[in-house]
Image (cartoon, helix red, strand yellow):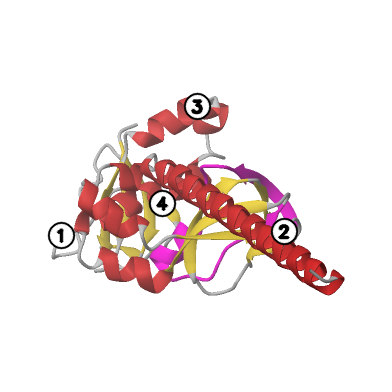
Amino acid sequence: MTVSSYTLIILIVLIIGALALISLRLRLFSHALRVERKKSIEMLRQLSWLSELDEKEFKRVARRFRIRIFPQGAKLLKEQEPDNGLFMIVAGEVKIEIRDILMGTAEAGSVLGEMAFLTGHPRTASVVAESRVQVLWIQRVALRSIMKKSPQLENGLWEFASMRFAMNLLGSKEPFSLWEQKRFIQWLSAGEIKLPNENGWLDLEGKIGVLVIGTAAQHDGSVVVKAPCSLTGTDYIFSKEARVFLRDP
């Protein structure tokens, strides 16, 4: 056998070895992705607005979420931009800014973007990656199409988002501003989202109310308020699309 033949054999062996190594790495990478996807889906199951869905409905929603990865410093959401979906943080941490002022941070398990998605209003804050961030993202069109066929999903998401509205609007007012955050969140979790009747009326007697979407006008028309806002008094006629978060004092 000539030297050139030995060289060719060695080259072929090296190529086969390299291909085998690449194949192994691809299988390991694919396995890691499946494990990561499974872990992410289990995190989705813990969300209050998804946890009450039956298995078939949950899987239908979960299939539409996509994993997206952002480097440190990337803007996941931009203030005043239109809605293009919502996401849950799987790993990493983000900071929430309004007019470049830091308002807070969010980490794994947090959902962001739901308020703009539900109301159709522009984003009220920017979200910036503090570290490498992995999220599960669902596009607006995809979630809207599922919600049209699932009132349970729609109501669950509204209840989840309305608690966030109520937290933002009531948190700076007494007595809530004097409470520990855990107590305040527990108190909010017992609230519910309500729609006015066909005449635009909703019983607010003895309730604390937050207008989440729509408008509310006093019967004499002297005052008209727009969402989001807290409600004082009980004498309101609500717009057709209005939704109100209510809680006993």
Q: Amino acid at mark 1?
A: Asn
Name which residue lies at 39% across and 43% down. Answer: 47
Q: What's the distance in space between the residues labelled 4 and 1, CA to CA?
A: 21 Å
User: In which quadrant will I find the C terminus?
Assistant: top left
Q: Quick check: is 71 in the magenta stretch?
A: no
Q: Quick check: is 126 in the magenta stretch?
A: yes
Residue that mark 4 sits on = 161
Residue that mark 3 sits on = 182
Q: Secondary structure at mark 2?
A: loop
Q: Please report the bounds of the magenta region as a residue range.
A: 101-129
Residue 197: which numbered mark, if any?
1
User: In which quadrant will I find the N terminus?
Assistant: bottom right
Of the pair 92 and 188, the residue shown nearer to us: 92
Question: Can residue 233 be seen from the camera position used here?
Answer: no
Characterize the local packing of mark 4: few (<14), some (14-19) or many (20 or more) Cα atoms within 10 angstroms.
many
Residue that mark 2 sits on = 71
Q: Secondary structure at mark 3?
A: helix
Image location of residue 4, percent across then percent down = 83, 74
N-terminal label among 4 and 3: 4
